[in-house]
Image (tube, helix red, strand yellow):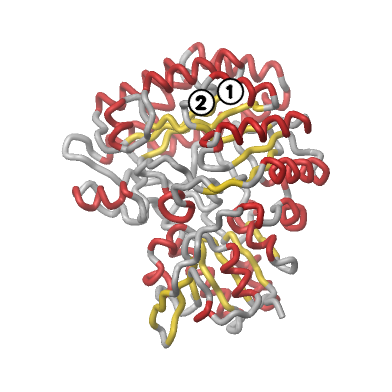
Amino acid sequence: MTMKTLFLNPPSFEGFDGGAGSRYQAKREIRSFWYPTWLAQPAALLPGSKLIDAPARGLTLADILPLAGDYDLAILHTSTPSFAADVKVAEALKQANPRLMIGFVGAHVAVSPEPSVTASGAIDFVTHAEFDFTIKEIAEGKPLAEVDGITWKRDGKAVNNRERPVLHDMDRLPFVADVYKRDLAVEDYFIGYLKHPYMSFYTGRGCKSRCTFCLWPQTVGGHTYRTRSPASVAAEVAQMQRDFPQVKEFFFDDDTFTDDRPRAEAIARELGKLGVTWSCNAKANVPYETLKVLRDNGLRLLLVGYESGNQNILHNIKKGILVDVARRFTADCHKLGIVIHGTFIVGLPGETRETIQETIRFAQDINPHTIQVSLAAPYPGTFLYNQAKENGWLSLGAADLVQNDGVQIASLQYPHLSSQEIFEAVAEFYKRFYFRPSKIASITLEMLRSWEMMKRRLREGVEFMHFLQARENRT
């Protein structure tokens, strides 16, 4: 008999940002929520399961605890900054129902399985890398000793089972659309640069790029881009169209959807037949011809990780992109009318006061529609983390990456650049990008064209100013 299974994105601090697999490291400048796809995918393998996304629903531990007695198995998605808080949730669930088996999933436990599983008596096992069929086997009653891809406890000591082979036939995974319909409210999910309500899911896993800071490919996804067939992707979008007629945009959350250009074009042509608006993650090297095919078949926006405008920094982080190529790509997008949300990182290896200014000028010059500026975050399991440890770049007290209230810490420092200077650069970057007359004018025009956009931008503006004020209070 299959265990009755609860998939839980645990409660978090007020202002939690549900990005990056729904356990993002910190509050953002504008609050946002991504779909908990990493939990929804195994939940779809277990028809009698339940997915609860506590932060998106605004649920507290007090709201969750009464449900503990209803389940035999609970799967909690955790991360490095949220792990300590998530352990407390697990302990409370176990106290409420001592028979409840509890497993942790996510990048943090994948790279630190032994200390994670022994961190608390409430944790029965943790998973490595991909865990969809791992959870299915456990829920179906397979003894933990026989389940590949987990670390569990025998007599209080960690036991590492053999690794589970990477899943290559991604079409074996069921649609997450059914779980979204059963357990989630699409209106809970909001991203500033996407139309609302939106819907996102993965059409593949892994990324062939080797960016030293990027968490997912180095921990759970791998560097081989394993994909679903275009027919499968189109079929799920069509189902979502039927089940969620209010959705205005679909976002493909693959690390780099444009890594396989022929497949991206094939999916685009299928989406064109459906008449949907869609967006995706892209590398700043997609040729004009491919961009045009995507645009002609419903592509509205690309989420592009530029990271830096300095070529040496891009080499240092193994980004695999040339600044001139990124400039040409961006110009092509502007020419085609493709909107860009550009992401940048300050504090990467090689960063100086001068390179920060160079990147700010680069961002102003290429002028994406909106931007996100993050502090370099050395997550355990990444090349950047090991590099920082070896070189003594980790700033004092940076182990948790965020403060107790969710504000991200500048975790890196260099002999020539302090963590405080890196921290302060984020606010400067935002101000110099957004407080330009040309950018203010374009955003104002966007607002005047749409009452809905007017309301959104005003709300976001208030959140953004609060974000800047909170940072200034910490300097």
**Numbered disc 2: secondary structure:** loop
Report the side of 381 relative to 95 (left or right): left
Q: Nearer the viewer, residue 391 or 66?
A: 391
**Numbered disc 1: secondary structure:** helix
Are circles 2 and 1 on residues that touch, CB within 8 Å? yes
Q: Is residue 335 above or below residue 349?
A: above
Q: Nearer the viewer, residue 141 or 56?
A: 141
* Precedes in sequence: disc 2 or disc 1: 2
Report the side of 253 relative to 25 (left or right): right
Q: Nearer the viewer, residue 90 or 208?
A: 208
Residue 111 at x, y = what percent? 39, 61
Structural crowding at the residue carrying mark 2, measured as other residues with C-alpha within 10 Å and reported as few (<14), some (14–19) or many (≥20):
some
Going by the numbered disc 2, the residue's amino acid type is Val
Report the side of 131 relative to 199 (left or right): left
Going by the numbered disc 1, the residue's amino acid type is Leu
Q: CA distance from mark 2 to mark 1?
A: 7 Å
Q: Is residue 193 above or below residue 56?
A: above
Which residue is rendered at x = 38% and y = 35% of the image?
Answer: 345
Which mark, residue 17?
none
Count of marks placed on residues: 2
User: What residue does disc 1 label?
Assistant: 291
Residue 247 at x, y = what percent? 75, 38
Which residue is rendered at x = 43% and y = 60% of the image?
Answer: 108
Residue 416 at x, y = what percent? 17, 35
Q: Mark yes or no: residue 202 visible.
A: no
Which residue is rendered at x = 44% and y = 47% of the image?
Answer: 223
Q: Nearer the viewer, residue 263 or 355?
A: 263
Report the side of 86 relative to 421 (left or right): right
User: What residue does disc 2 label?
Assistant: 286
Q: Residue furthest bottom?
A: 155
